[in-house]
């Protein structure tokens, strides 16, 4: 037989927070925060008379589905435009090549290249050190 004299009959009547239902506690917190927000909004003079949302503008007429007639471009126009774009692309490519050459002269790039070379030499030395330590088996040449 268990002693149930300490258990409250109504979960909201419990005075000890550890004995209350967690959902009841969360609901109470939610109500408290809502009431605090409402009270602060009511007393804050910057929000008095301000609408809760920005006013919604009436929908404007959408642009016509069919665009206005554009002057038709001839094949020569397309070729001219394409040539202009190609020239602009070539200029950008040349600028990027100059920047790349400048980057190769920077001390950071040189340090990175030196680190790569050192790593390759260390890897090669490690491989040479490991050459005599392979295990020879009957079915395989090396493991």
Image (cartoon, rainbow, N blue to C red):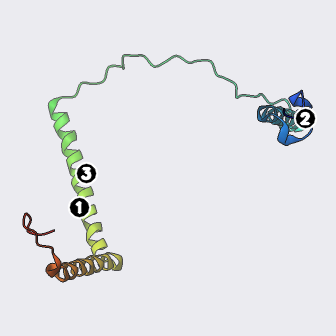
* Residue in the picture at 30% in, 67% down: 99
According to the picture, the residue beneath numbered tag 2 turns out to be: 14
Mark 1 or mark 2: name the one nearer the start of the chain.
Answer: 2
Disc 2 secondary structure class: loop
Q: Residue furthest front?
A: 1
Corner quadrant of residue 137 = bottom left
Using the image, determine if residue 48 lies above or below residue 133. Answer: above
* Residue in the picture at 15% in, 34% down: 76
Disc 1 secondary structure class: helix
Q: Is residue 64 left or right of residue 72?
A: right
Between residues 35 and 130, which one lies in front from this camera angle?
Answer: 130
Using the image, determine if residue 74 lies above or below residue 101. Answer: above
According to the picture, the residue beneath numbered tag 3 turns out to be: 88
Mark 2 or mark 3: name the one nearer the start of the chain.
Answer: 2
Corner quadrant of residue 112 = bottom left
* Residue in the picture at 90% in, 31% down: 8
Mark 3 or mark 1: name the one nearer the start of the chain.
Answer: 3
């Amino acid at each position: 037989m268990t002693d149930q004299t300490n258990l409250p009959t109504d979960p909201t009547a419990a005075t000890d927070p550890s004995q209350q239902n967690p959902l009841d506690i969360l609901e109470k917190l939610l109500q408290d925060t809502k009431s605090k927000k409402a009270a602060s909004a009511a007393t804050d003079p910057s929000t008095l008379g301000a609408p809760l949302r920005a006013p919604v503008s009436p929908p404007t007429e959408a642009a016509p589905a069919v665009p206005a007639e554009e002057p038709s471009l001839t094949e020569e126009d397309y070729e001219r435009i394409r040539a202009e774009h190609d020239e602009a692309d070539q200029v950008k490519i040349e600028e990027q090549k100059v920047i790349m050459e400048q980057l190769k002269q920077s001390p950071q790039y040189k340090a990175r290249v030196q680190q790569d070379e050192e790593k390759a030499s260390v890897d090669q030395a490690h491989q040479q050190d490991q050459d005599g330590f392979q295990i020879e088996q009957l079915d395989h040449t090396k493991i």
